[in-house]
Amino acid sequence: MPIAPALLEDWLRERYFTTTYDISSSGVENYTVDQVLALAGTSAASLGDVMFRDSHSLGGEPLRAALAERHGTDPGSVIATQGSSEAIYLVMHALLKPGDEVVVQAPAYHALVEVAASLGCRIVPWAMRTEHGVVTNEDELLALIGPDTAMVVVNFPHNPTGATVTEDQQAAVIETCARYGTWLAWDSAFQHLVYDRPPLPDPTARYPRAISFGTLSKAYGLPGLRVGWALAAPEVLAGCVRRRDYTSLALSPLVEAVATHAVRHADELLRPRLAQAAANRAVLADWLAAHRDRVSADLPAGGVTAFPELTTVADVTAFADRLDREHGVLVVPGICFGAPRHIRLGFGGAAAELTAGLDRLAALLPEPR
């Protein structure tokens, strides 16, 4: 089956490189090469001996070892990929077939839905509801999982809402999947980017049919490095390699060298960006409270995105387009996530850019009738 257009990428591709105030992005402020290497206690000179030869299909041993150490697993259970999007693509192609039932959280990042749909799977949406940044209807998710469910796909902390689940809720999802032998695909892109709570445990430590996805793009400020990964049983990764032999083959050894430094010093990269995001989240909370007559949103518990409903705007997509064209402020219209009354706001960047963008957004919002 043909794959659906990635509406989010279509929207950003036309605007991301020309906008003035980006308050759309789902990641923290980006690092430079020098900044990453300095935080890792090294310099560009350390990359001089990198040989431009092919890397292993699963990723080079140093990078996989660093990822395994950080996540408490074995290097044989790690594949390093071209961003987490490739990991999602490979895993779903390895494990799913036409007609399979796949339960997917809604709203969701497009790859988590459309890759399975393009394989001819039957998508069963779980319409997530939240309060104070935490899921309130996990019972409805559990009720959707049964003997015919091939895979459950979730993302916590969630893009675009920033919502999460408790450890008990996570355990209930794992237990229900285990009851039926269902694959659990857990997108952990924002695992360590959380507020007022510890990160969720990796589900692969508790369930052999779980797969978790991660990336250096979101919480670590390295989207241009294009490095992600999947943690899964070796037999799952073997299926991924068979598909990868027809796509990217492997990562660049130069990319892997930088990524290895980043993973080994992930906390040093995360710490300042998490502090910045927490301060920006407080700014966002004040802004949401000041405009609650025109904007309705739950404050995120993790990640760096919120997903407010613009209650006084008739056509949110047209509004977002005008906001960018006339005022230089980039947001993502909710239509990209199947929720046309909403926008995605990103608060992971520079504080001044966030404030300027929010001020201009507020000035354009219609007054309530």
Image (cartoon, rainbow, N blue to C red):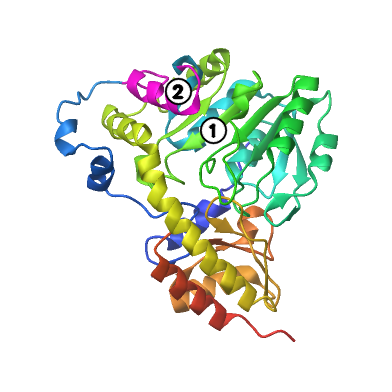
User: Which of 212/238 is in front?
Assistant: 212
First reached walking from the N terminus: tag 1 or tag 2: 2
1 lies above or below 97: below
The three-letter amino acid code for the residue at tag 1 is Phe
- Specify whether 240 is left or right of 164: left
Please give the range of residues in magenta.
Answer: 55-74
Tell whether label 2 touches label 1 (CB within 8 Å).
no
Picture coordinates of residue 274, whole percent (x, y): 45, 51
56 lies above or below 227: above
- Asked whether the viewer can see residue 49, the reply is yes
Give the total number of marks visible in the rendering. Answer: 2
Q: Which residue is mark 2?
A: 68
User: Which of 349/107 is in front?
Assistant: 349
Picture coordinates of residue 152, whole percent (x, y): 71, 32
Picture coordinates of residue 283, whole percent (x, y): 52, 69
State the quadrant of the N terminus.
Answer: top right
Figure quadrant of residue 343: bottom right
| Residue at the spot 50% in from the left edge and 20% down from the top edge | 73
Q: Residues within 10 Å of mark 1 (few under 14, many from 20)?
A: many
- Asked whether the viewer can see residue 246, the reply is no
Picture coordinates of residue 340, whole percent (x, y): 68, 63
**Which secondary structure lies at badge 1?**
strand
34 lies above or below 16: above
The three-letter amino acid code for the residue at tag 2 is Ala
| Residue at the spot 76% in from the left edge and 52% down from the top edge | 129
Figure quadrant of residue 362: bottom right
Q: Which residue is mark 1?
A: 213
Q: Residues within 10 Å of mark 2 (few under 14, many from 20)?
A: some
| Residue at the spot 49% in from the left edge and 33% down from the top edge | 86
Q: Which mark is residue 18?
A: none
